[in-house]
Amino acid sequence: MKYIKSKWLWLLALLFIAACAIDKPILLYPTGGEAVSLPVTLVWSHVKPSEYWVMIDTTTDFYDPIVWVRISDTTYEINNLPVRMYYWYVEAHTEDLSSYSETDSFRIE
């Protein structure tokens, strides 16, 4: 009987976590190291956050991102980056939860 109770508690806990989770944003443009010209508008899918955090860096560790901005839209326009490869990702945030996109890349030409 004890095993059955604990099994149901685990199931309820997993259902609660799944109900509270938010989808992760999907980066739509630019992706795959695509060469783009300035100005370029980063685009990602909408999820149900209160805000998005956009990170752009020249390395994939994002230790000291060259762009870190909080916005409420699913686009962000860049006007002033030097020619080179960049990596980016988006965090979606609600009051209590967050989710992260995959990291992708683009190249300013």
Image (cartoon, rainbow, N blue to C red):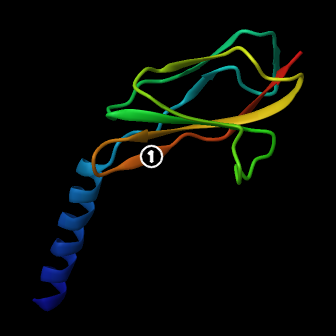
Task: Tell me which residue sits at (69%, 43%) in the image.
Answer: 65
> Which residue is painted at 73% across and 53% down in the image?
61
Numbered disc 1: secondary structure: strand
Disc tally is 1
On the image, which quarter does residue 32 sit in?
Answer: top right
- Who is closer to the viewer here, 95 or 69? 69
Q: Quadrant of the N terminus?
A: bottom left
Q: Is residue 10 above or below residue 33?
A: below
Residue 96 x, y percent position in the rendering: 28, 52
**Residue 92 falls left or right of residue 79:** left
Please say if 39 is above or below 95. Answer: above
Vertical order, 51 against 81 (above or below): below
Image location of residue 48, percent across then percent down: 32, 32
Q: Position of residue 66 (x, y in %)?
A: 71, 38
Q: Residue at x 19, y 87 (%)?
A: 3
- Where does residue 13 sit, x and y in percent of width and height? 22, 66
Residue at image mark 1: 99
Q: Which residue ends up furthest to the bottom in the rendered image?
A: 2
Residue found 80% across the figure and 45% down from its top: 59
Query: How packed is label 1: few (under 14 Cα within 10 Å), some, or many (20 or more)?
Result: some
Report the front residue among 26 and 85: 85
- Is residue 19 shown above or below 45? below
Q: Is residue 57 left or right of residue 102?
A: right
User: Looking at numbered disc 1 in the image, what kind of residue is underneath it?
Assistant: Ser
Q: Quadrant of the C terminus?
A: top right
